[in-house]
Amino acid sequence: MNRTFRTALIGCGHRGRKHAVGLKEEQRCEIVALVDVNRNAAEALNSDFGFGAAIYEDYKEMLLKEKPEVVVVCLWTRLHFPVFKDCVNSGVRAVHCEKPMAHTWGDCLEMARIAEESGCQLTFSHQRRFAKGNMLVREMINKGQFGELLRMDLYSPPNLLDCGTHTIDQAFSFNNETPVKWVLGAVDASDTLNWFDVRSEITAVGTFVFENGVRANIQAGGPDQDMWGGVRVIGKKGFIEVFWDGNFGQAVVYDDPSWKPEQCDEKPDVQTVRMVKDIFDCLISGKEPELSYKKALRTSEVIFAFYESVRLNKRIELPLKGVTDNPFITMYESGKFTIKK
Ligand SMILES: NC(=O)c1ccc[n+]([C@@H]2O[C@H](COP(=O)([O-])OP(=O)(O)OC[C@H]3O[C@@H](n4cnc5c(N)ncnc54)[C@H](O)[C@@H]3O)[C@@H](O)[C@H]2O)c1
C-alpha cells in the first residue's frame, strides 16, 4: 500500500529533531502538523526540514483540527500518558512515543490497557534495537555463536528509568523477550537527579533473573563501570560486549580464538530511519512492531519492581503486584533519603 498517513509531531526539541530525520525519509509519512508550546522551536524545525506543516502551540487544538492518523510524541516523561490518551480519544491510529513509557507503573499499565482496548498501535523509542550491531548480536545469539546464555552484565548512565530503560530493553532483545522472574535492587540516593522532571537516584545496582535462568546484573550510573552503556552477553561458548549503539567491545568464542566480530560503523540516524519504517510497515500489516508497548511494558516492570524492592527491602517476584506509583518518588517525597545539601 503506497498511501500516505497524516502525521503530527508533538514536541520539537532535542528528540523531536532526531525523529524528524526518520519522518522526513519515510515516503508514507506526510507531516501535517508540528506542535510545541515554544512556537519558535516548531517553526525552526519546520523550516529546517522543509515540512510545510501547520504549526500549533496546543496539541489538543491540533488533534481537533488536523485529525492526524499518526502522532509522534517527543515530550518529557510525565506528559507521555495524558497525551497518548488524548490521541486515542481523537481517533489517532498509531502513537509513537519517546521512552521511558511513563513516570509511574500505574501510568504504564493504563497506557498498555488503552492501547490493547482501542487497537491504537503504541510504540516507544527504544530505537537502538535497530542498530546494525544489536541486530547482528541477536542473530549470533540465536545461531548459538556464544552457546547457551548464562548471564548478562548491564550498564547504563544514570538513571534506571531514563537510561537504564535502553539497556534493559537491549537485554530483553538478546534473551528472546523472555519474561523476568524476580528483581532485587539497591539505590544510592545520597544525591538525586531530576531529569525530564522525574526524580531519581544517582546510582542503581541490582540483579534480575529471567524465566530461562539467565541472570542479569545491572549498574546504572556511579563509579567503576567497566562499560559506559550496553550489555556483556556471556554464554557457555564465549561472550561479547555490545554497547548501546551496537558497537562491540571485547568478544571471544573460546574454541575459535581467531574469530572477531566486524564493527558496524553507522550513524545513529540510521536507527531512527529503520524505526520509523517499521512503525509504518506494521501500521499497514497489523504485525506487532519491534518497539511495541508490550516490550516496553516488560522493561518498565523491571524498573518499577527494582524501586519496589528498595522500598520493601526484599526481592520482588514478577508480575509486579500492588504498585501503581513510582516507589522511588514516593520514598523521596516522604523524606526516606538523606540528601546532600
Ligand atoms: N530515545 C532516546 O534515545 C532519548 C534520548 C534523550 C531523551 N529521550 C526522552 O525524550 C523525551 C523528550 O526529551 P527531549 O530531550 O526531546 O526534551 P526537550 O526539552 O529537548 O524537548 C521537549 C519539547 O517539548 C516542548 N513541550 C513541552 N511541553 C509541551 C506541551 N505540553 N505541548 C507541546 N510541546 C511541549 C518543549 O518546548 C520542548 O521543545 C524525554 O522523555 C526523554 O526521556 C529519549
Image (tube, rainbow, N blue to C red):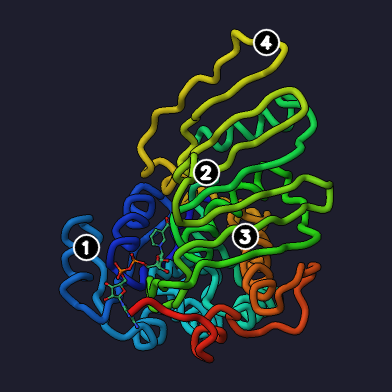
How many C-alpha atoms fall within 10 Å of the one at disc 3: few (<14), some, or many (≥20)? some
Q: Which disc number belongs to residue 292?
A: 3
Which is nearer the eye, 91 or 270?
A: 270
The kind of residue tagged 2 is Gly
Q: Secondary structure at mark 3?
A: loop
How many C-alpha atoms fall within 10 Å of the one at disc 4: few (<14), some, or many (≥20)? few
Rendered position, 100 above or below 2? below
Q: To which residue does mark 4 refer?
A: 256
Instruction: Residue at 58%, 80% (x, y): give it.
Output: 326
Q: Secondary structure at mark 2?
A: strand
How many C-alpha atoms fall within 10 Å of the one at disc 2: few (<14), some, or many (≥20)? many
Rendered position, 198 above or below 181? below
Of marks 2 and 4, which one's residue comes earlier in the chain? 2
Of marks 4 and 3, which one's residue comes earlier in the chain? 4
Q: Secondary structure at mark 4?
A: loop
The kind of residue tagged 4 is Asp
**CB-based contact (under 8 Å), mark 2 and mark 4:** no
Mark 2 or 3: the one toward you:
2
The reply to whether residue 119 is in sight is no
Instruction: Residue at 46%, 81% (x, y): give it.
Output: 338
Q: To which residue does mark 1 refer?
A: 45
Of marks 3 and 1, which one's residue comes earlier in the chain? 1
Q: Residue furthest bottom?
A: 334
**CB-based contact (under 8 Å), mark 3 and mark 1:** no
Q: Secondary structure at mark 1?
A: helix
The reply to whether residue 136 is in sight is yes
Which is nearer the eye, 41 or 303?
A: 303
**CB-based contact (under 8 Å), mark 2 and mark 3:** no
In this rendering, would 320 be left or right of 105?
A: right
Residue 186, position as x, y percentages in the image = 61, 65
